[in-house]
Each structure stands twice: as C-alpha cells, then as structure tokens.
Amino acid sequence: SETAGKTHIDAARVLEACLYFLKPRLKKITVIQDLTLEIHWVWGDENQLQQMFINLLLNAVESMNGEGTLRVSGTTVTDTVSDRHCIKIEDSGKGVPKELRTQIFDPFFTRGKTQGVGLGLFVAQRIAAQHGGTICVHDSRLGGAALTVTLPSTSRKTTKKENHAFTDR
C-alpha cells in the first residue's frame, strides 16, 4: 500500500546520518553543513529517503573526483498552498550543462563516469516523486551542480505516549 513503511521523519537528520555513513568517502572533501536546527518533518519511508540522499551525495562526490567542497543546506518554504522542505546538495565539481539537465534523471544516463551504471539519480528522483516531492538541478555557487530536493512538510505533534524520555519506571 501507499503508506506501508511510512512514518514521520526528520529529513535533515536522515541527511546527516547519510553524511556520517559516507564519511570514509568524504576524506578529501570539505563538508559544509548548513542545516538549521528546525525539524524538517516529512511523511515517508526512512530507508528510501536514505537511499535517495546517498545517491545524491555519491553523485556529488563522483563529480568532484573525491575532492572539493560539498555543501548541504535545508530550508522550509511556506506559502498559501503548503509548507515544503527544500534540502540542497551542492558541489564544486564539473556541474551539469543546461542541455543535459533533463537527461541526468534518465535511467542509465552517464557522463564520463568510471563507476556506476547511471541509475543513482533516476532512483533518487523516483523516490522523491513517491514522497510527493521533486529534485531540481541548477548551478551551484561552489562552481558545480546544486540538486534541490523539495518534499511536502507534515506537522507532527509529540504525544505523551511517543515521548519516551520521561516515562515512569
């Protein structure tokens, strides 16, 4: 079903966990984390969101040939329609020419890669879509590409039952 495996998740914390998991691959990369302390609640499958972020991060690392600058940031956009969380992954790599920006999400699309088969961004975009979101690519101020994941926000209220920090023993 559509909701199987889905729960309230803080997308920014999932991204931080992915950065930690990829630490061995980030040895020669300067990582700038600009994730606010605000909680970016989304309704989703944590494993799928981890896969999406790992694919996006690995794509950035590969585009920099393992060294450069990686910046991750998160903001919440509020308007009259809905609240959305925007999580941006920027790199100082080669960037993506404008004429290829729609193709990079096609299955098996690669561009001078020595590893991978061109499914990472395809899978990432599918996961974003399954969560009601999008991924857009544009130029980064770091010189490479910026991939922005936009996911619908969900509010979450902590009930006494869910708050395990102060339970009676």
Image (cartoon, rainbow, N blue to C red):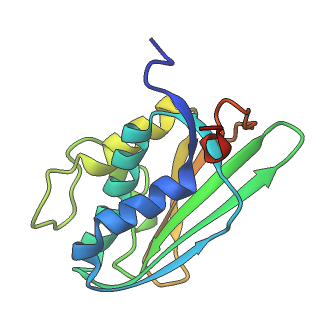
Q: Position of residue 32 (x, y in %)?
A: 50, 81
Q: Position of residue 21 (x, y in %)?
A: 30, 63
Q: Is residue 91 above or below residue 169?
A: below
Residue at the extreme left of the image, as rendered: 114
Front residue of this view, candidates 29 and 47: 47
State left or right for residue 38 relative to residue 92: right
Figure quadrant of residue 66: bottom left
Which quarter shows the N terminus?
A: top left
State left or right for residue 4 relative to residue 155: left
Q: Is residue 68 above or below residue 156?
A: below
Residue visible at 22% across and 63% down in the picture: 111
The answer to whether residue 99 shows anywhere in this view is no
Figure quadrant of residue 80: top right
Residue at the extreme front of the image, as rendered: 169
State left or right for residue 126 relative to residue 43: left
Residue visible at 15% across and 66% down in the picture: 113
Residue visible at 54% across and 43% down in the picture: 134
Residue visible at 14% across and 56% down in the picture: 116
Residue at the extreme top of the image, as rendered: 1
Front residue of this view, candidates 62 and 4: 4
Q: Position of residue 24 (x, y in %)?
A: 22, 75
Which quarter shows the C terminus?
A: top right
Front residue of this view, candidates 114 and 47: 47
The answer to whether residue 168 shows anywhere in this view is yes
Number of marks in the rendered image? 0
Q: Position of residue 127 (x, y in %)?
A: 42, 37
